[in-house]
Amino acid sequence: MSMDQYLIRVEGVLPERALDDFVNVTVNPGSVQTVLHGDLPDQSSLAGILDYLDELGVEIVEVLKVPSGGSERAANE
């Protein structure tokens, strides 16, 4: 099964407890925005992460599906 890579950019810093909940996703916290990126097996997994972020009250700034190998580059832009 192939996985798609996604980049999710959110406003602010995620609560510490939230960082442990993301499996297969790398979290790059910043002072202004936090970037999550990783391989997700399907749209349902993406929806689950977005729903969880919404429950936390986090403002989602951007969601990108990136070409294979492109999430590291996109996370640093």
Image (tube, helix red, strand yellow):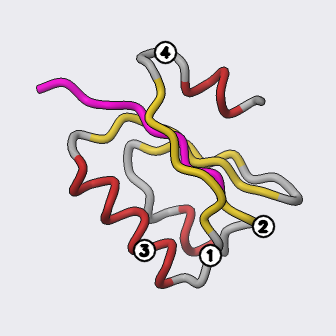
Q: Earlier in the sequence, mark 4 or mark 3?
A: 3
Mark-to-mark CA distance, 4 and 1: 27 Å
Of callouts 1 and 3, which one flags the residue occurring earlier in the amino acid sequence?
A: 3
Which disc, if any, is residue 69? 4
Q: Which residue is mark 3?
A: 52
Provide the residue designation for mark 2: 12
Q: Residue at x 53, y 41 (%)?
A: 7
Query: Could you tell me how far apart the alpha carbons at marks 1 and 3 are, in whole angstroms?
Result: 9 Å
Instruction: Quote the CA–CA distance across marks 1 and 2.
Output: 8 Å
Asked whether, in this view, residue 68 is left or right of residue 45, the answer is: right
Asked if residue 2 is among those painted magenta in the image, a careful observer would answer yes
The reply to whether discs 4 and 3 touch (Cβ–Cβ < 8 Å) is no
Sequence order check: which comes first, mark 3 or mark 2?
A: 2
User: What is the magenta segment's predominant secondary structure?
Assistant: strand
Q: CA distance from mark 4 to mark 3?
A: 25 Å
> Which span is picked out in magenta?
1-9
Compared with residue 43, is residue 58 higher up or lower down, i.e. above or below? below
Residue sitting at 82 percent across and 52 percent down?
A: 30
